[in-house]
Structures are given as structure tokens and as C-alpha cells.
């Protein structure tokens, strides 16, 4: 089995995990404030402060989603999904665990006929990007015209929902885990369980006297 620890694909995948970790924390801040906005308003404590923090979180969410889904460029290698896959395609290693690879492809509606695992994974990634093409364009437009620059007289429709943001995060987290476990051969960090910022923000709400605090969008 080809050893990929310390190779560019491993280093890029670690870089991708850092982007995803940041996105996880930002999503928790943005969505936790959002689903408790009525409680915050009724309590009358920190309304302007939490509104500002939520705005900053949204800007950061936008930047990280754009980074995670940015296409690889020859001149500027990226720690994006596409950047990681670029090295996977070049190395063409055999998977350590085909069951995890097949599970990922099936979970995200990839091709049922898997003659080439690399091609099947490529098709799965492209299919997911196609399903969320309009949402990714929306984030890219907001990033370019509002976050990175300040375009005069630009009006943006509402950005995609927290649910869409979560789906974009989960796909990236699953991809990172797949590369770590099935190709690099090292145990992946559990990005989906890294929710310490959410717990910290919940404790702040409790200290401020907020009651019936929601911590999940389904609550």
C-alpha cells in the first residue's frame, strides 16, 4: 500500500480540516444566535452585540465555504476539496478501506457502477457541486462583492439557509475523513463532534438569564 503520510495530499487534507473546523465553529455561532433570536430580543440583553457577532460569523462562513469549494489552480495550490482531490488523482493510490469509499459514494448519490474508484469519487464530488451550484455561486458573489470588497449599490438576496450551510460542511467533513482513513491511512479528527464553541456560547446565554435555549435547528 502506498504511503502518503507527509505527502502533499496529506498536508492539504490537514489544511482542509482546519478550514472545516473553523466553519463548524462559525456555523454554531451564527445558527445558535439565529434560532434563539426571539429569546434574546425578549430578554433585551445583548441584542446589538449578538447581532454584530452573527454578522461577523456569516462573513467568516462565506469565506470558508468559498475556500473549501474553490477549484484548484496550477499556480496557487489550495487546501480545498478540489485541491486535495487533485493530488489524489495524480497519485492514484489504492484505498485502504474500500467499504468507506463505497459508503461515501453511495451517501452522496455517486455512480453505482464503480470501475475506477478515483473516477467514481470525482463524479460524486462533481455531482454534489452541481446540486448546490446556485448556493455556491451565491456565497461566492457575497464574498466578492461584500466581504472581500464593497461594491457600490450591490443588493444581495438572502444567503442559503443554515440547513444548506450544514450540508456543505458535512460533505467537506466526510470527504476529509474519507481521505484520511481510506487513502492516507491515519485516523481522522471528528469534525462533526467539535462543538465546544457552541457549548461555550450556550453557557453565556444561560449566564445572561436566557431560558429555553435551543441548540439545534430541529428543536
Image (spheres, grey):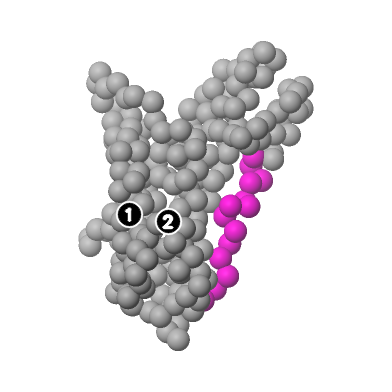
Does 171 appear above or below 207? below
Task: Choose between 218 and 176: the one closer to the eye.
Answer: 218
Circle 2 SS class: loop
Q: Quadrant of residue 44?
A: top right
Residue 186 on the magenta span = yes
Marks 2 and 1 close (CB-CB < 8 Å): yes
Q: Position of residue 146 (x, y in %)?
A: 33, 29
Q: CA distance from mark 2 to mark 1?
A: 8 Å
Residue 23 on the magenta span = no
Lateral position of residue 136 relative to residue 28, left or right: left
Residue under label 1, please give it: 127
User: Residue at 45% across / 82% down in the picture?
Assistant: 3
Whether residue 149 is visible here, answered yes or no, is: no
Q: Position of residue 195 (x, y in %)?
A: 63, 46
Q: Position of residue 10 (x, y in %)?
A: 44, 70
Residue under label 2, please give it: 108
For the record, the magenta segment spans 184-198
Q: Position of residue 13 (x, y in %)?
A: 44, 64
Circle 1 SS class: helix
Amino acid at each position: 500500500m502506498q504511503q502518503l503520510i507527509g505527502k502533499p495530499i496529506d498536508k492539504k487534507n490537514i489544511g482542509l480540516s482546519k478550514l472545516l473546523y473553523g466553519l463548524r465553529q462559525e456555523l454554531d455561532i451564527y445558527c445558535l444566535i439565529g434560532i434563539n433570536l426571539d429569546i434574546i430580543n425578549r430578554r433585551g440583553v445583548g441584542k446589538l452585540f449578538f447581532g454584530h457577532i452573527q454578522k461577523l460569523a456569516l462573513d467568516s462562513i462565506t469565506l470558508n465555504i468559498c475556500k473549501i469549494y474553490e477549484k484548484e489552480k496550477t499556480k496557487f495550490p489550495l487546501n480545498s476539496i478540489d485541491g486535495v482531490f487533485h493530488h489524489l488523482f495524480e497519485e492514484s493510490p489504492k484505498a485502504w478501506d474500500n467499504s468507506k469509499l463505497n459508503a461515501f459514494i453511495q451517501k452522496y448519490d455517486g455512480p453505482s457502477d464503480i470501475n475506477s474508484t478515483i473516477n467514481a469519487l470525482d463524479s460524486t464530488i462533481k455531482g454534489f457541486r452541481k446540486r448546490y451550484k446556485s448556493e455556491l455561486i451565491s456565497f461566492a458573489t457575497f464574498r466578492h462583492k461584500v466581504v472581500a470588497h464593497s461594491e457600490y449599490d450591490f443588493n444581495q438576496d438572502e444567503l442559503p439557509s443554515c440547513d444548506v450551510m450544514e450540508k456543505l460542511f458535512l460533505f467537506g467533513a466526510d470527504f476529509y475523513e474519507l481521505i484520511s482513513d481510506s487513502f492516507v491511512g491515519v485516523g481522522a479528527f471528528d469534525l462533526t463532534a467539535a462543538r465546544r464553541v457552541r457549548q461555550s456560547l450556550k453557557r453565556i446565554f444561560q449566564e445572561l438569564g436566557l431560558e429555553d435555549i435551543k441548540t439545534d435547528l430541529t428543536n
